[in-house]
Amino acid sequence: MKKLIGWFGLAVLLLAVQISLPSSAQDAKITVMNPRGIQPPIRLIPMPERGSIEGKTVYVVDIKYANTRPFIDELHKILQERYPQTNWVLKQKTGMYMDDDPDLWEEIKEKAAGMVIAIGH
Amino acid sequence: MTGRFVELASTTAYKKGIPNLRINYTPHPITDRPADICRKFLEGSDPHSGKPLVEQIVSALTNPLSPEDKKTGFMMRDPRPRLLPPDTEDNLQQLFMDSNFTDGGPVILPTEKRVVEMLKATSHDPEEVVGTMRPSPPHEAWEYNVEMVAVNAVMAGAKPEYFPVILALASTGTSSLFSSTSSFARMVVVNGPVAREIGMNPGIGALGPFNQANTTIGRAWTYISKNLGGSGDPGETYLGSQGNALNYGNLCFPENEEQLPKGWKPFHVQKGFKESDSVVSLFNGWSYANIAWYSHLTYQEIMTNWLSHFFSYGTRQATFMIDPVTAEYLYDQGFDSKEKLADYMATNSTTPAWLFWNPRLVELAEQGVEPYASYLKLGDGAEIPQSRYIRRPPRKTGSKEPQTGSGRPFFPETLDAQNSLEIVVVGGGTNTYWAGGDFSYMSSASVDQWR
């Protein structure tokens, strides 16, 4: 009987050690390295001054995203209906919707008081 | 903008330095909506602000600026600590998941010791800048050095000997998680001695999850794209509507150079490298199919028919991954180079009418411009006798339309099959299979310069 109790005691002790070891390993703190890269600083771009658009020209630009022309046309019509004192010019950007159109941006800077551009989808 | 992109639009405006840009939102989507629905959208309210939309647009044009709107100078970002605060492994794994540092699975935690071991595999200084990367052209570019790439290589489970390949991938500045609503995938093909040196698998199951180098190099590219290239934040820097399962491993495999038929050049040699160079080559696409078909037709005819009906949306390019036994068959059919096979397929493939016609071509056909006028008479179910697998003509500086030799803006007559169809040999020869997909070649980078 004594021998049996002895074995039982040893088994309990081993079990306790087994439970306590992983637990302490799991609780140990480690240091790891940051996986993130370096984000660039952001250069602030001041917005141009604005005011009344009565008697002025505003461009409505269609970037030609697939099958969105009805939306642009309706936008242009509603702006003309509700704000007739403003000259709303509907203009299609060149190329595909992803292409830049520096000529158009220059034209707008030169001739318009503002721009409304609709981007898909 | 449409209301689905509030987060994207506001963060983009912020990162472009116009944090208060006046953005108005319509219900989503506006594509394929008839005029009466569009008018209803416009006469309603902005789904984000709840205010009447048209009035809000005009207010955006007329309301005076705030002092914030007029600010100039720079906004600095939060400093980047080299080490993260100490914590238990479980908590760090959770932190990496919660911070979107992973692909959704656990990682090998990048301790300094592991990163130092990785760095031993290159002669380059840990602080040397490797490059910059962005999710897509309009996004800001993040910068990273050799040590930062090593951190991500450790996380992916890569062995140090894979590191020069991973650095070569990082040096391209190409994100594997391109931000588009159409859920792009990307592919890596490794050529040259390095593939054998590091134990990559070009044989049975090369494209599957069976080899540590194939798997972890591909996975490292995803981690690099997320953590060093600022990509992969759904809704902000990743917009793929359904996502793409190929993004987990990026189809990373070596070409089976040892089993190329006589006269077939390894892919990197086709791109101007020496056979002894070790090179990574990147591809962009969406999907691929794995096919074998037994009929009275030759394999080259089956492949060409498949190509005719393959979508290849927008790119008009495709890549074939051909099993070595199929490559041998094609060689026996007289194709003694990859170029000859690509030329045959591009020349003989046609285009189903539903894929051929776009509004611009219909316009030309209706104006009587040939061959479009004749093609239009063939009807909706016709096979148009023109291949889509042609080189996209380079755009001349200042030109507003694509230029072609024939002067037509689309579908030029001149074919250049070498640049529209790519062929890579891979597989273990267990059957006469080939895989084909809408992948187009992007670029190659030297592995040797990162050893």
Image (spheres, rainbow, N blue to C red):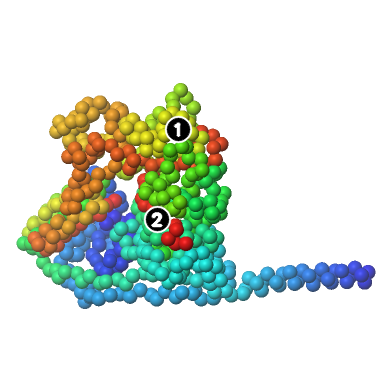
Q: Give the labeled residue for mark 1.
A: B331
Q: Is residue B344 left or right of residue B70?
A: right
**Residue B144: image location, x then y, percent:** 40, 67
Of all chains, the one bearing label 2 is B
> Is B415 situated above or below B57?
above
**Residue B439: image location, x then y, percent:** 39, 45
Residue at image coords 21%, 55%:
A100
Closer-to-camera residue (B209/B391): B391
What is the residue that sits farthest to the top in this orientation? B296
**Residue A74: image location, x then y, percent:** 18, 49
**Viewer-side label of 2, 1:** 1
Q: Give the labeled residue for mark 2.
A: B445
> Is B356 situated above or below B127?
above
What is the residue that sits farthest to the right in this orientation? A1
Give the residue type that dot 2 points to.
Ala
Q: Residues within 10 Å of mark 2 (few under 14, many from 20)?
A: many
Circle 2 sits in a helix, a strand or a loop, which is it?
strand
Circle 1 sits in a helix, a strand or a loop, which is it?
helix
**Residue B230: image location, x then y, percent:** 39, 63
Of all chains, the one bearing label 1 is B
The quadrant in which residue B381 appears is top left
Residue at image coords 46%, 30%:
B332
Q: Is residue B120 left or right of residue A101?
A: right
Q: Earlier in the sequence, mark 2 or mark 1?
A: 1
The answer to whether one can see residue A29 in this image is: yes
Give the residue type that dot 1 points to.
Tyr
